[in-house]
Image (cartoon, rainbow, N blue to C red):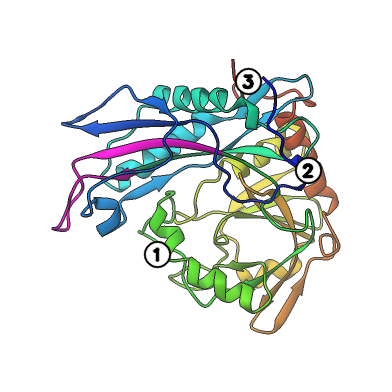
Amino acid sequence: MEKKNLDWANLDFSYRKTDKRFVANYKNGKWDDGALTDDDKVVMSECAGVLQYSQSCFEGLKAYTTENGDIVAFRPDMNAKRMENSAKRLEMPAFPADKFVDAVVKTIKANEAFVPPYGTGATLYVRPYMFGCGPVIGVAPSSEFQFRVLTTPVGPYFKGGVRPLTLCVSDFDRAAPNGTGHIKAGLNYAMSLHAIVTAHKNGFDENLYLDAATRTKVEETGGANVIFVTKDNKVVTPKSSSILPSITRLSLLYIAKEYLGLEVEERPVYFSEVKDFMECGLCGTAAVISPVGKIVDHGKEIVFPQSSKGMGPVITKLYDTLTGIQMGRVKAPEGWIKVIK
């Protein structure tokens, strides 16, 4: 299929309408088969559950053109499992995992012309999402739901390419210990908007959130998990029940251990020890992994010696290996790559 005439190398991370999207509806206790549609508009009741009580969840993954020309998706089965967990927590009917993967494949295939060519640095972002669309006026779950998959070609998440980011320690809390921080609920991101706009106004790229209970431990940022590297090249990530289980982070930890032979630790990370790390990075589907140069705690700067001017040596190896797997340059673990046929 002939590719669309886009300036692939200079795409930003924003929405561009593609040709097709997938839509399935839940009504009377069951999901229909769903289908692809040209219509990008959503029509629902003015009293829909998503509009009244924010009953929604979503996922994010990417499709790539590999070195040999295949179009692939990265670990969509993991996104299906995570959305199932999100749905359960929000009293929504889980969209079956096999149908989830099939819908993702169908939507990517239908928008093949929008999958950026190999080597451009751009990708096709895939956004599965679900919301309550039945009318609800009392505080209760909706009885009707819609599952959709949209796609859009994107460039890098952080403007300016790979550069060291500056974080600020946020005065806001991202998630409570028994709240919804571990699921990908739309409401989590709505409450983070004021914090991120404030951070940007103050010259920072992102917020670093501490745990809400004690404000002594590192959680994550508004849209990514955090990775640290010690003096002896140990890869450390915060562990908490209120952190979103990033598929990218889980993949990077596996790569660190199994591909690079590094020691890996998932444990509570106290903010007081952050000053002792050599490298820091933010990881997620959108950004993959971006270096953090410094964290500013109310005027006090913590600078990471090996990632203050760019990607440090360990984060570089993690990034190169993961993107190598995604692009077909490095052999992938079994089940990680879904070829779109």
Mark 2 Cα within 10 Å, few/some/many (few <14, many 20+)? some
Residue positioned 55% across, 45% down in the render: 246
- The secondary element bearing badge 2 is classed as helix
Magenta extent = 131-151
Residue 9: mark in rendering: 2
Q: Nearer the viewer, residue 256 or 208?
A: 208
Q: Quadrant of residue 328?
A: top right
Q: Nearer the viewer, residue 296 or 213?
A: 296
Residue that numbered label 1 is attached to: 176
Q: Nearer the viewer, residue 67 or 291?
A: 67
The N terminus: image quadrant: top right
Tell me which numbered mark, 2 or 3, is placed earlier along the sequence. 2
Tell me which numbered mark, 3 or 1, is placed earlier along the sequence. 1
Residue that numbered label 3 is attached to: 334
Answer whether residue 143 is magenta in the image.
yes
Callout 2 amino acid: Ala
Give the left or right position of residue 105, taking residue 168 as reference.
left
Answer whether residue 35 is magenta in the image.
no
